[in-house]
């Protein structure tokens, strides 16, 4: 298990690194939404997520709700397949927050 880190690349771009699971998401993570403040658009890159479960999706939904309340356009990119499959089960993959890139091979 690797810890969950939110890495600031720029004021509008963040990378999530580590596990996005019940074991790594704690109350401090839930309170650390301040990175969504101060800008009108935020992109969260999930390419560094090594493992995820439904807690990861729940956290993403909380980020979406928080960003809506604060009128911030939030976009997720490089969503791990496991997390995207969970989102599909609940219909969240149809949200404008999810960017699914086509293979560029």
Image (cartoon, rainbow, N blue to C red):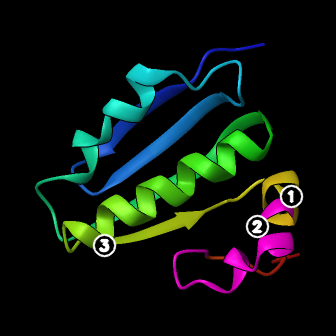
Where on the picture, by quarter, is residue 87? bottom right
Q: Residues within 10 Å of mark 3 (few under 14, many from 20)?
A: few
Residue at x 40%, y 46% (from the top left corner): 14
Residue 52 is a magenta residue: no
Magenta stretch secondary structure, dominant = helix
- 75 lies above or below 59: below
Identify the residue under disc 2.
87
Residue 32 as seen in the image, left or right of residue 94: left
15 left or right of 37 in image: right
> Disc 1 and disc 3: Cα gap in Å?
25 Å
The label shown at residue 81 is 1
In front: label 1 or label 3: 3
> Is 100 in front, or is 88?
88
Q: Earlier in the sequence, mark 1 or mark 3?
A: 3
Position of the C terminus by quadrant: bottom right
Please provide percent x and percent y for residue 55: 69, 40
Q: Residue at x 10, y 55 (%)?
A: 38
Label 1 secondary element? helix
Q: CA distance from mark 2 to mark 3?
A: 18 Å
Q: Confirm whether the magenta stretch covers residue 87.
A: yes
Circle nearer the N terminus (2, 3): 3
Q: Which residue is mark 3?
A: 68
Q: Residue at x 55, y 54 (%)?
A: 60
Give the image quarter of residue 98: bottom right
As helix, strand or loop, the secondary structure at mark 2 comes to helix
Instruction: Specify the label residue 27 is tagged with.
Output: none
| Above-or-below relation of 70 to 92 | above
């Amino acid at each position: 298990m690797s810890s969950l880190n939110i890495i600031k690349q720029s004021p509008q771009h963040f990378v999530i690194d580590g596990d996005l699971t019940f074991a790594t998401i704690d109350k401090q993570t839930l309170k650390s939404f301040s990175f969504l403040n101060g800008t009108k658009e935020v992109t969260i890159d999930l390419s560094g997520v090594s493992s995820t479960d439904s807690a990861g999706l729940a956290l993403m939904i909380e980020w979406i709700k928080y960003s809506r309340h604060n009128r911030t356009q939030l976009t997720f990119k490089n969503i791990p397949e496991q997390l995207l499959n969970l989102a599909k089960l609940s219909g969240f993959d149809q949200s404008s927050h999810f960017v699914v890139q086509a293979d560029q091979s």
